[in-house]
Amino acid sequence: MVRKPVVLLQEADVTRRRMMEFNLEVEGFAVVAPRDLPELERRVCDADIDLAVLNWDGADRQVLNALQALKSAQAARYVPLLVIGGPVSEEDRLVAYEAGVDDIMVSPFSVAELLARIRAILRRTSPELGGRIVRAAGLALDVDSGRVTRDGKDVRLSQTEFRILQYLMEHVGKVRTREQIRAAVWEKPGQVEIRAIDVRITRLRRQLRIAGGSELIRTIRSIGYVLTDEQPRVQWERAAADAVLSGV
């Protein structure tokens, strides 16, 4: 059984932290949320931490000092770091990268983008973990085994349908054009007619419906397709989280 990736989350604002923690757990991550920087420094050295998400606005030198200490500690194994916050200046971003930060997200940003960045980092640094299992809208797609489930029920797909679904899941909530789908899925996109994408999407929708639930893939007229999240509570929580993250 693949264990859950463990994300360490440092966020001083309680409301924002709870929102992010909830959404990370919904997406299949285990979350460790230290209350202060000393606890952060202790926990990031734990063997079970796979990625750290730290809030830093550029002015807080305490967080930067913690970053530098973490990267220089001989006892600490490599833990990828994602910094969120801001807006920060170009100079501050360069300082953060020099300190060993792997990625920076400047506010405002959505929960979906945060999750996508986390998955992207884990796919690079720990492909054996849950980063290889993409989760969205009640679906779980195992990149290695080729298995797809919807709310625990198996969904039978062809290789092409699997790749289309993976692409849409990795961009959940974002409209993808037919040209983008063709370029991402087929090795020789120039040999594939646009109409073939519509045919594949139709079959993909049918297979997803067999597993039960509402329609997940919406057609955006004259543009393309988007995978939407069918879970009402998660949608509400994400909307609230996005409002908090953007400062609305």
Image (cartoon, rainbow, N blue to C red):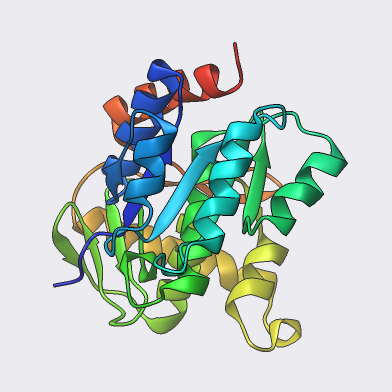
Tell me what residue is drawn at x 27 percent, y 61 percent.
48
Left or right: 92 with respect to 129? right
Q: Quadrant of the N terminus?
A: bottom left
The answer to whether residue 64 is seen in the rendering is yes
Image-based side of 246 in relation to 202, left or right: right
**Which residue is nearer to you in this view: 75 or 26?**
75
Which residue is drawn at the image coordinates 40% and 32% (left, top)?
20
In the picture shown, does residue 129 fall above or below 25? Answer: below
Where on the picture, by quarter, is residue 21? top left
Answer with left or right where residue 18 lies relative to residue 184: left
Quarter of the image for the C terminus: give it.
top right
Q: Is residue 229 visible?
A: no
In the rendering, at what x and y percent does residue 227 appear?
47, 48
Q: Nearer the viewer, residue 5 or 192?
A: 5
Q: Quadrant of residue 158?
A: bottom left
Residue 149 lies left or right of residue 119; in this view the side is: left
Quadrant of the rendered image containing residue 18: top left
Q: Is residue 116 above or below residue 239?
A: below
Residue displayed at 39% across by 29% down = 36
Query: In x, y percent, where is residue 3?
Result: 20, 65
Give the vertical position of 210 relative to 56 (above or below): below
Identity of the residue drawn at 46% across and 69% down:
74
User: Residue 73: x percent and y percent?
Assistant: 48, 62
Position of 18 relative to 71 (above/below): above
Measured as percent of width and height from the top left, residue 79 is found at 46, 62
> Number of labelled discs?
0
